[in-house]
Image (cartoon, rainbow, N blue to C red):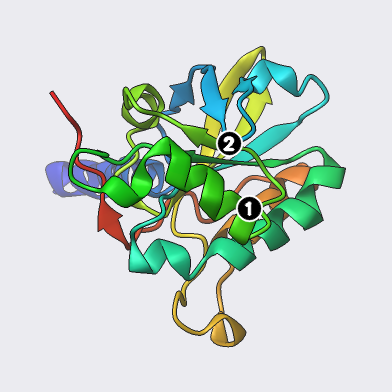
């Protein structure tokens, strides 16, 4: 009888531990930080995060010229930059695809694409895939919201820009915008990660 009581008393503690483990897996217990970079912009200048000393954070979008899914988001990326740059959270786009396999993504074509689409943000060439590997970028587009904390750049969100690539008027969950809004309000980001959908970034060895 006494053993049964002890087991009953121990049960809540076990449940609390299990709950803590489950919550930890959903709230992103492992904090990922990324490093600054220096990459060539389409205007010929080298661009780094440190070039924006007033920035609270960044919306970093790994994208490219050739991917059909990435093309769906060019206007939306411009819109994100227009909205959040004045709030201290500018957009930086990076192309890290293998130009041996995709000639459309060479630097000269990036310059043409930025001009044609009237990009308002830096569009950087990551030929050595240094930034892509540091961020663990997988697809185009793959978006990261990073925030400055204690002198480090912390990933607060990574994944898709929103939940409807084909039909922007039917978007129900603007993941990136929601994450930035929450951070600007001093809140915890509720959705920290989603699945990025697009063309695979093939990493060279």
User: Residue 59 sits in which quadrant?
Assistant: top right
Q: Residue at x 18, y 45 (%)?
A: 101
Q: Residue at x 74, y 40 (%)?
A: 89
Q: Position of residue 196 (x, y in %)?
A: 36, 57
In the displayed structure image, the side of residue 174 where residue 102 appears, left or right: left
48 or 55: which is nearer to us? 48
In the displayed structure image, the side of residue 88 where residue 24 appears, left or right: left
- Quick one: label 1, few (<14), some, or many (20+) residues within 10 Å? few
205 or 22: which is nearer to us? 205
Q: Position of residue 125 (x, y in %)?
A: 45, 32
Which element carries disc 1, helix, strand or loop? helix
Q: Residue at x 45, y 74 (%)?
A: 165
Q: Position of residue 163 (x, y in %)?
A: 47, 73
Q: Residue at x 45, y 66 (%)?
A: 71
Q: Which residue is mark 2?
A: 42
In the displayed structure image, the side of residue 112 where residue 17 appears, left or right: left
Earlier in the chain: of badge 2 and badge 1, it is 2
Can residue 15 be seen in this snapshot?
A: no
Q: Is the residue under label 1 in contact with that under label 2 (CB below 8 Å)? A: yes
User: Residue 47 sits in which quadrant?
Assistant: top right
Numbered tag placed on residue 145 in the rendering: none
- Could you give the CA–CA distance between mark 2 and mark 1, rounded to whole angstroms? 9 Å
127 or 109: which is nearer to us? 109
Residue 144 in the image: above or below residue 195: above
Can residue 133 be seen in this snapshot?
A: yes
Question: Quarter holding the C terminus?
Answer: top left
Which element carries disc 2, helix, strand or loop? loop
- Quick one: label 2, few (<14), some, or many (20+) residues within 10 Å? many
User: Residue 178 sits in which quadrant?
Assistant: bottom right
Q: Which residue is mark 1?
A: 115
Q: Position of residue 48 (x, y in %)?
A: 61, 20
């Amino acid at each position: 009888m006494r053993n049964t009581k002890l087991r009953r008393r121990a049960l809540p503690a076990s449940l609390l531990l299990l709950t803590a483990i489950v919550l930890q897996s959903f709230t992103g217990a492992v904090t990922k930080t990324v490093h600054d970079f220096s990459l060539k912009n389409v205007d010929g200048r080298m661009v780094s995060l440190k070039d924006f000393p007033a920035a609270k954070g960044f919306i970093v979008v790994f994208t490219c010229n050739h991917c059909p899914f990435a093309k769906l988001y060019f206007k939306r990326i411009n819109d994100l930059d227009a909205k959040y740059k004045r709030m201290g959270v500018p957009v930086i786009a990076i192309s890290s695809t293998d130009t041996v396999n995709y000639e459309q993504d060479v630097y000269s074509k990036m310059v043409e694409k930025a001009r044609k689409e009237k990009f308002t943000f830096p569009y950087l060439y990551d030929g050595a895939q240094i930034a892509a590997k540091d961020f663990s970028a997988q697809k185009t587009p793959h978006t990261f919201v990073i925030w400055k904390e204690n002198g480090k750049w912390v990933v607060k969100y990574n994944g898709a820009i929103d939940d409807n690539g084909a039909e922007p008027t039917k978007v129900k969950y603007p993941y990136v915008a929601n994450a930035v809004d929450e951070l600007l309000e001093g809140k915890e980001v509720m959705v920290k990660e989603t699945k990025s959908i697009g063309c695979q970034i093939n990493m060279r060895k």
